Amino acid sequence: RANNSNSSSELSTCNYLARQKGVKKGMFLGDAIEKCPDLVVLPYDFEGFQEVSGIVADQLRLYAEQYNGCIEQVSCDEAYVEINIDPNVCHNNIHDFVEQLAEHIRADIVKKTECTASIGIGPNKLLAKLAADKIKPNGCYVCRDWKLLLGGLNLRDIPGVGWKSQQKFETRGIRTVADIWDLDDEAETVLGGIIGSGNAKKIVKYCFGEDDRPVTPAVRKSIGAECNYGVRFDGPYGPDYMMKGLANEVERRMTVAEIRGSKLTLKVMKSKDTTKVPGKFLGHGSCHNLSRSTDIPLTRDKDILASAGMKIFDLLDVDKHSIRGMGIMVTSLKFDRDNDANSSSPLSSWLKKHKSGISQTTHDVNDEASDIEQEEIMIESANVSKMVTFEEGVPETSSDRKDYLMPNTFSQIDQEVLQHLPSDLLDELKTEYKNRKPVNEQSPNKQVGQRKISVNKQIPIDGQVSVKRMFKLNSIKSGKEALDGNCTLSQLDCLPLEVQLQIANSDNTTIAKKQSRNIVARQVTTTSSAEIDLVAANHSCSD
């Protein structure tokens, strides 16, 4: 039982017994307890919601396929199912047939999930929806006469009529669907003068039981992440830190859904008055909702999403102290399978086709020692050095990393490869490199050669510099430990790695690098190009 009468937590929903006591979804828990002292409050069970929703959707899909129809999933607990009935099958008694079918569906749902369901049946989506609302909870209703179903409804019960429209209608003495019927041919004109001709036409059609919206299988059009609770930038974390977190979550969701997008929208909630304390503790209060969009390359890479989001944020020019919520949404989506099927570029197709033939050639390192330059990295400290061995290869740090890599400049491409390229592909390759950034604009921690190297490196590390110092920095950046001093995480990210390590560990230890041509690997695999990370600290951290 709930016992916190002062709680500002919000109810996400409530059952019909609680509604009879005056409890409503979205109500503060404290207010709900005053109306219903015996209220029982349950925690969220997202795994349970997902499990039951999936079972019900699968069951409805079976019936839809059986009757040559389709299913449109509206939410986790609501869906439209279209079925096509042969009059000979139902002996020309369609209403009784579909009612029995609905009862079979409800019985299957109870048997498989132990949850009840309500089903409304009608010739279109509007009447089916109103029929389901009429019979809730736990029932079935067939709309045999649309006038009988609509006659007792208020306009507020019609989809598309909100409380603002309801207030406007009531000032003109229009409250019920029957009032619209009384207006007859003038209904559309009268309502058009109140809410506009477009909305008026739709609502009048609904009031006469007309709805031509098809039942369409839902297709994901957007994917994103948003947070509007507890957002305050009065500490060491800035908007860019939150942007990275949102981008990371969006990348995770897009990876699960196997999609990419080419348009990003940033949503920002700006407080109307920062001096007012919201009714809900750490809530967003009354806000202006700002948004702006930009085109991005087809991707789901978190770094690209975060960078694009920050560019939009800078254009919005919002004081960070007035922000009460942020979110990013990606649209113009494409599934990975569609991308692979339309792998359009002849250059990409050719490279993928010949990739295996190029990469399977191996050489003994003793025969080609002079062709490979290996980096040995010395991290200096006052303590005794230790030897650390790890495997170095091409790191897969991005979900968008393709299965082949290309050199940064045209001159680095293996000339034997170029000789075998058709003329049209060679022209495309030249155009591609003409539009690429120069090498000196690439990350200073990346170097590109013509070999993909998989080697065991022995790196002398003096004392406790490498792993402990990197873990300390990583712990601070992940928020597990606080950052001492006045430096913010945003400022820390802008500093060189050496300075970041010094600030995180409160020391003056320096990092020095020296090159060596000593080869310690036994075998290398040659490819047309490669990318090798030469920062040992990054490997130590990721390991």
Image (cartoon, grey):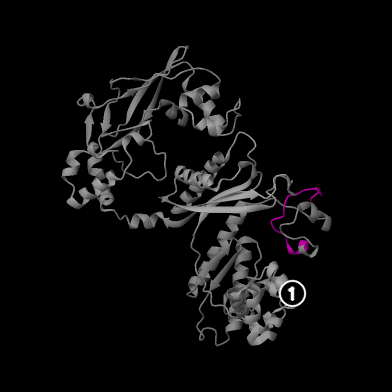
* Whether residue 363 is situated above or below residue 264 in the rendered picture: above
Residue nearest the observer in this picture, 26 or 461: 26
* Whether residue 117 is situated above or below residue 381 in the rendered picture: below
Horizontal side of 324 relative to 249 (left or right) equals right
* Residue numbers of the magenta segment: 1-18
Q: Main secondary structure of the magenta part?
A: loop
- Residue 390 position within the rendered picture, expressed as x and y whole percent measured from the top left: 39, 26
Q: Residue at x 26, y 48 (%)?
A: 431
- For label 1, the residue is 170
Horizontal side of 235 relative to 34 (left or right) equals left
* Whether residue 77 is situated above or below residue 468 in the rendered picture: below
Q: Is residue 14 magenta?
A: yes
- Residue 230 position within the rendered picture, expressed as x and y whole percent measured from the top left: 66, 44
Q: Residue at x 48, y 19 (%)?
A: 465
Horizontal side of 312 relative to 16 (left or right) equals left
Horizontal side of 302 relative to 11 (left or right) equals left
- Residue 480 position within the rendered picture, expressed as x and y whole percent measured from the top left: 59, 32
Count of numbered circles on the image: 1
Q: Is residue 538 magenta?
A: no
Residue nearest the observer in this picture, 362 or 13: 13
Label 1 crowd bin: few (<14), some (14–19), many (20+), radius 10 Å:
few
Please tell me in which quadrant of the rendered image residue 417 appears: top left
- Kindly identify the amino acid type of the residue bearing the numbered disc 1: Glu
Residue nearest the observer in this picture, 154 or 437: 437
Is the C terminus in the top left, top right, bottom left or bottom right quadrant?
top left
- Residue 385 position within the rendered picture, expressed as x and y whole percent measured from the top left: 43, 14
The secondary element bearing badge 1 is classed as helix
Q: Would you say residue 231 is visible in this rendering?
A: no
Residue nearest the observer in this picture, 138 or 346: 346
